[in-house]
Amino acid sequence: MIDKKISQAKFLFPKSQYPFYHSYIELLSLMLVKHELKVSKCDMEIIALAFGRPTHIFFHSVCSKPSLLEQLDSLVTEGLPIKVEAKKYLSLRNSELSADSNRAVIELILSQYRLKLDEIEALKQQEQLEQKLAQQKAQDELKAQTAALLKKNTEARQTHLANLVDFDDFDIYHVKKNSRVDKLLTQLRRKPLSSDEMKWLHDIGFCNELIEQKNHIQLAHQHYQNWKQKNMPWELVNASAAYRKGGELKKIRKTLNEQYPFAHAGKDKKLKSALLTTFGGVCRDQEDFTRGIELGHEAHKVTPLNFRPCTLLGAIYLSTGEFDLGHEWYGKAKDRGFTQNAYDNDIKSVYFRACDEIKSRLKQNLIATGHKYDWLSKP
């Protein structure tokens, strides 16, 4: 009966899936039946603590039962919740142990007892004193090896971490010091990266939204300084576009307000229209739709054959629920060279930027007007 109950307990944790818990249950069973291995209750509690609180509670609950048969029964009945937890960790971490388990302690003590079991089988004809001496020697050697291995691993990890650098502002961590990634991200804190450098970061998986946003802002600062210090009028247009992409609008809105109505553009209608249009785009981003519409119409009057003021007006009108006007202005943009692909991307951008109420109405309008997009089926 006792052997059957021990087998049931060990069967609960198959050795191939749960090597640590299988060995622990086996040793705990031998402790309960007072096997000649003389499993230490103290060691079993140390292992239980190393597994974590649930296993420690399980250990004390098993030991508290008044009879051996009840103790062996509880190995199965109370071991089931432990198995559920171990199975969960196995699925999530590919290990039966929880993240806060002390694997080194578990391996150390279990390996000690496994060695003892092997020695008992191999040396059971020897004197008891010789057996104890051999076990103690093996135990000491194992402790020394484990301590040396732990020290080596700790030193290796410390050396590894000493050669890494974190970029908290970009949500990028553990970058090798003096690597190209380290140099580029350090540079990005001071000035923009080239398109090739950004592409390289993206290709190797070290580019994210924060990095792209920072690069837009650095580009914007560069364009802004070129405009302000080198008398390069188109750089104000470029700065505005980059500030918009970077989501930093306050500074450029103030500058555009001060420069309006852009007398410095002189007779360059294309430049004036671009300044008016980008100013309108900034207003649109800040949801100042009335001012954005005014600037869009003004830009259209300056360059009536340019599609960009038309797309600005189309986007604002759709964003404010004036769908007929929005489609009308997008139609004018297409007549002036706005491509179908660019139009589709614009419509998608307007839709996902809209508030919930406008988004719901715009979705119905787009479907009703024959716009068939996969993303319209998304919430």
Image (cartoon, helix red, strand yellow):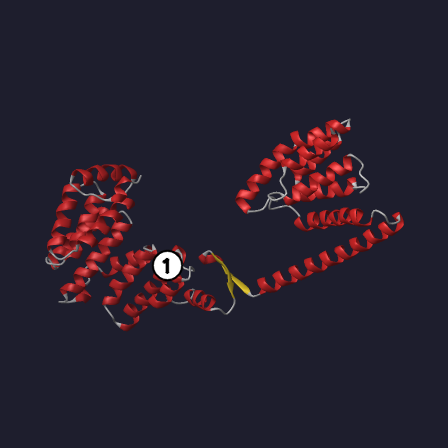
Where is the N terminus found, in terms of image quarters?
A: top right
Residue 243, picture quadrant: bottom left
Q: How many numbered marks does the figure carry?
A: 1
Q: Residue at x 25, y 47 (%)?
A: 348
User: Which picture quadrant has residue 96?
Assistant: top right
Residue 336 position, x and y percent, is 11, 56
In this orientation, which residue lies closer to the viewer: 18 or 50? 18
Mark 1 is surrounded, within 10 Å at the Cα level, by few (under 14), some (14 to 19) or many (20 or more) other residues, namely: some
Q: Image quadrant of residue 299?
A: bottom left
Residue found at the very far bottom of the displayed protein: 230
Q: Helix, strand, or loop for circle 1? A: helix
Instruction: From the viewer's side, name the closer residue of 328 and 128.
Output: 128
Q: Say which quadrant the C terminus sits in.
A: top left
Where does residue 17 sit, x and y in percent of width and height?
Answer: 59, 43
The foreground one among 375 and 324 is 375
Query: Is 245 displayed left or right of 24 in the figure?
Result: left
Residue 225 visible? The answer is yes
Q: Is residue 288 visible?
A: no
Q: Is residue 345 left or right of residue 71?
A: left
Observer-nearest of 113 and 222: 113
Q: Which residue corresponds to mark 1? A: 212
Identity of the residue drawn at 12% across and 46% down:
328
- Left or right, 343 with respect to 90, comes to left
Q: Position of residue 178 (x, y in %)?
A: 50, 70
Q: Is residue 88 above or below residue 112?
A: above
Residue type at tag 1? Glu
Q: Position of residue 199 (x, y in %)?
A: 36, 64
